[in-house]
């Protein structure tokens, strides 16, 4: 059993102070009975909590999909710039959300935001081999030699990378698939091949592709089917 005000506030639409005001104004019911106190104990999984007659759907964990634009940092604060959390709309925001993995400030594309630490670990841990695919633009044409070197692994300062797939898709573009996430890894791998990355866009994680209808800067909840695809490995 949990406090009523804590359960409602955990869903993100209202602060604890706002919830207390709603209860005081008799706008909250539990199983059809008007709530009398913020500290009232409820079973969030069994009780029907309503605000102004509208049932509250209690979600234990939240999984959001973001199409990250340039200029945002992958952190929970804005000490280094504007956090990607600023893009989460009020109706989806809750305390405890964090980006599952990092994209550089100038990198765009698919990012997951959640409050589920275990799920984040599953999709980020190198030993899980959950793949991440990026569309990379470089300053020189990609070559078969680059493809071979990526497939063999490239020796960076901290050691040899895991094999990575490189597919040439344009005069200056390639699709790169990684199963690990070292600091600035793609930029450093191309630098070792004599190329400079000029644009980097994540297009998929696991077997989930960035939806075409999710515009840059937009955030929405992941579906149950998408969550499964996110964690799939080959």
Image (cartoon, grey):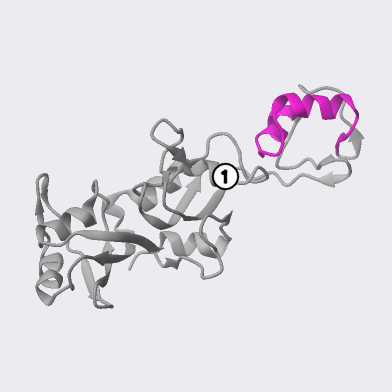
- Splitting the image into 4 quarters, where does residue 34 fall? top right
**Total tally of numbered discs in the picture:** 1
Quarter of the N terminus within the rendering: top right
Q: Is residue 159 visible?
A: yes
Q: Is residue 42 magenta?
A: no
Q: Is residue 54 left or right of residue 16?
A: right
Q: Which residues fall within the magenta stretch?
A: 1-30
Q: Is residue 181 left or right of residue 55?
A: left
Seen in the picture, residue 69 relative to 121 is either above or below; the reply is below
Q: Position of residue 64 (x, y in %)?
A: 54, 52
The residue at 32%/60% (across/down) is 200
Residue denoted by label 1: 61
Quarter of the C terminus within the rendering: bottom left
Q: Is residue 32 left or right of residue 96?
A: right
Q: Position of residue 114 (x, y in %)?
A: 51, 45
Q: Is residue 12 magenta?
A: yes
Q: Secondary structure at mark 1?
A: loop
Seen in the picture, residue 209 relative to 129 is either above or below; the reply is below
The residue at 57%/34% (across/down) is 95
The residue at 34%/48% (across/down) is 104
């Amino acid at each position: 059993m949990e406090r009523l005000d804590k359960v409602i506030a955990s869903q993100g639409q209202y602060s604890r102070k706002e919830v207390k005001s709603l209860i005081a104004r008799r706008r909250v019911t539990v199983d059809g009975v008007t709530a009398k106190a913020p500290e009232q104990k409820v079973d969030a999984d069994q009780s029907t909590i309503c605000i102004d007659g509208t049932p509250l759907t209690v979600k234990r964990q939240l999984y959001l999909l973001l199409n990250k634009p340039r200029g945002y940092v992958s952190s929970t604060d804005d000490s280094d710039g504007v956090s990607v959390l600023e893009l989460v709309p009020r109706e989806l925001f809750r305390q405890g959300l964090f980006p599952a993995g990092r994209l550089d400030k100038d990198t765009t594309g698919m990012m997951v935001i959640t409050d589920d630490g275990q799920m984040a670990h599953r999709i980020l841990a190198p030993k899980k081999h959950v793949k991440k695919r990026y569309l990379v633009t470089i300053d020189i044409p990609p070559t078969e030699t680059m493809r071979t070197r990526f497939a063999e692994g490239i020796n960076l300062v901290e050691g040899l990378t895991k094999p990575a797939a490189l597919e040439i898709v344009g005069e200056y573009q390639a699709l790169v698939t990684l199963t690990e996430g070292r600091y600035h890894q793609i930029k450093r791998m191309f630098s070792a091949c004599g190329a400079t990355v000029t644009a980097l866009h994540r297009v998929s994680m696991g077997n989930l592709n960035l939806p075409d209808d999710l515009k840059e800067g937009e955030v929405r909840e992941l579906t149950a089917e998408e969550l499964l695809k996110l964690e799939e490995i080959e």
